Amino acid sequence: MKPINAIRMGGVDVLPLVEGGKGVAISNGITAGHWAAGGGAGTISVVNADSYDGNGVPVPQVYRARTRRERHEELIDYAVAGGIAQARRAHDLAGGKGRVHANILWEMGAAERVITGVLEGAKGLIHGLTCGAGMPYRLSEIAAKFNVHYYPIVSSARAFNALWKRAYHKAAHLLGGVVYEDPWLAGGHNGLSNSENPEKPEPPLQRVLALRKVLRDLGLGETPIIMAGGVWWLEEWEDWIDNPDLGPIAFQFGTRPLLTQESPIGNAWKRKLLTLKPGDVFLNRFSPTGFYSSAVNNTFIQELRSRSERQVAYTTEIIGEHVAEYGVGPRRRPAYLTPADLLRVRKWEAAGYTEALRTPDNTLIFVTPDNARDILSDQVACMGCLSQCKFSNWSQEGPEFTNGKKADPRSFCIQKTLQNVAHDSESDEVMDQNLMFSGHNGYRFALDPFYGNGFIPTVRQLVDRILTGR
C-alpha cells in the first residue's frame, strides 16, 4: 500500500483520515478525542449530544413543556449543553494532536442557534465545522464569526458551486475542505437529487474530478476534498492517493468507528454490525427530513415499507372511478375509493389493519390500532427537532410554526427512535424496532479478517490498521 502522508487541512498538517459525524449521541467526545489523538480529524456530533450530571451520568432528554414551541426551546438547551460537554471531552483526550471537528445537520431544528451556542461555550476547543443535510449557506458566516474552518458536505460539484457563489466566497480563507459524500454509499441521510436514480449508483471518481475542476476554477486547487461513503481499506483507493488530477484527498470513515471499544453504542448494535450481509442496508425515503437515508433493513424499516404498501388513493366526493364510500376515523367521515381498492382495504382490515390514516397526498394508509395510537402520540409529542418535519407538520419558522402541510403518517419521529438506539442499544429488541443508520459497506464487518472471532479494536488500533493496510 502507498504510504499515507499528512496533508494541510484547517491550517495544520494532519493525517488524511476523518471520523464521520454520526448523531444522535453516537460520534461523541470520546471517539473524536481518540481519533484526533491518532493524528487525524475526530468529529463530535452536536445533534442532540449527551450532557452529564455531576457524577458523569448522561442527562435524560425529557421534555416537560406543554407546547411544541416550548419543547423546542428545551431541545435547544439540551443540544447546546451536550455539544459543549462533548467538545471538552474530545479536546482533553486529543492532547493537542490532530483536529476536533463538530458536525451538525443544517436541517436540524435551530441549527444556527445550537452551533452558535456550542462555539460560544467551547471557545478554542473546536477546530472545524462540518455540515450537510441541506444547503448550509450560512455555515461560512458562522465559521467566520468564531474564526474556525468549515467543511461543507456536498454530493455534487453543482451543489458546492451554488454554495460558493451565494456565500462561501466571502470567507474563502476559512474553507478547510469540502466533503464529497457519495449519495449511494454513505450511511445516514444522503444527498440524492431529483435528477439522480437511487437504483443506479454512479462511480464517485468522475463526480469528485468534477468537484476538483470547480475548486481549481475558483482558485481552490489545494483545498482538500474529503471522500466520504464506501471507504473501507485505503489500498482500495490507491489510484486516488497522490493523484495529481484529484489534488489533496482525505478519506472519511463513518461506519467503521461504530465498531470500536470507545464507541458508545451498545453490545446488541455491535453484534448486529458483525452479522450484516450484502443488501441489509436499505436506501429509503421514509425520513421526516424528506431526504433519502441508508439504514439497516430491520423490523422498523420493514414496518414502514409495509405501511406505505397498505395505501390507497381517495377523493372527498365521487369522481371518476372513486365511487365506493368508506368511513374514515371515529366519525366515519366519507372518503371515496375505487371498488378494487375497497376490496383491498377489506382484506387489510381482516388482517388487523383497521385504522385508516390520511396522508398529505390524498391517500389512506392502514395500520393496526396500536400503531395508530403510537403514530398519533409521537406526532403530538413533537419537540421540533428538525427545521421542518414531514411527520408532524412542524416548522421552526413563525408565526404559525407549521410547514403548511398535513402530517405524514408514512414517516416517523426521528428524534424518538435515534434516542432509543443511542441509549438502549444493549437490547436486541430495541435494535430491531428502531432506526439503525449504517453505510452500505456495513456488511464488510462480517467478511473482514480484522474483525475475526468478534474482535473489536480500539480507535487507535483501527487508525493504525487503516494506515498500515490489511
Image (cartoon, rainbow, N blue to C red):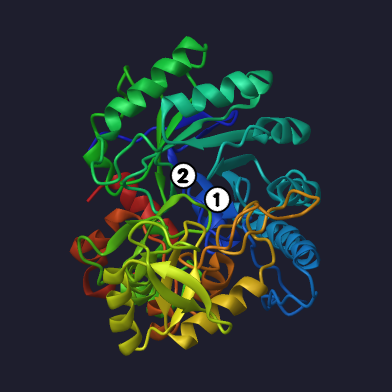
Q: Is residue 247 visible?
A: no
Residue for badge 1: 43
Give left or right: position of 68 versus 389: right
Q: Position of residue 9 (x, y in %)?
A: 53, 30
Residue under the image location 39 percent in, 54 percent down: 187
The CA distance from mark 1 to mark 2 is 8 Å
How crowded pointer 2 is (Cα within 10 Å; few <14, some 14-19, many 20+) is rated as many
Q: Which is nearer the eye, 362 or 135?
A: 362
Q: Is disc 1 in contact with disc 2, using a CB cutoff of under 8 Å?
A: yes
Q: Taking 330 as reference, is 137 above or below it? A: above
Q: Which is nearer the eye, 320 or 103?
A: 320
Element on which disc 2 rests: strand
Q: Taking 39 as reference, is 62 above or below it? A: below
Residue for badge 2: 18
How crowded pointer 1 is (Cα within 10 Å; few <14, some 14-19, many 20+) is rated as many
Q: Position of residue 179 (x, y in %)?
A: 47, 36
Q: Which is nearer the eye, 24 or 289?
A: 289
Mark with earlier residue (1, 2): 2
Q: Position of residue 312 (x, y in %)?
A: 36, 66
Q: Which mark is residue 344?
A: none
Residue under the image location 42 percent in, 71 percent down: 365
Give left or right: position of 45 versus 237: right
Q: Quadrant of the N terminus?
A: top left
Q: Is residue 177 visible?
A: yes
Q: Position of residue 37 (x, y in %)?
A: 53, 51
Disc 2 marks a residue whose amino acid type is Val
Give left or right: position of 195 versus 140: left
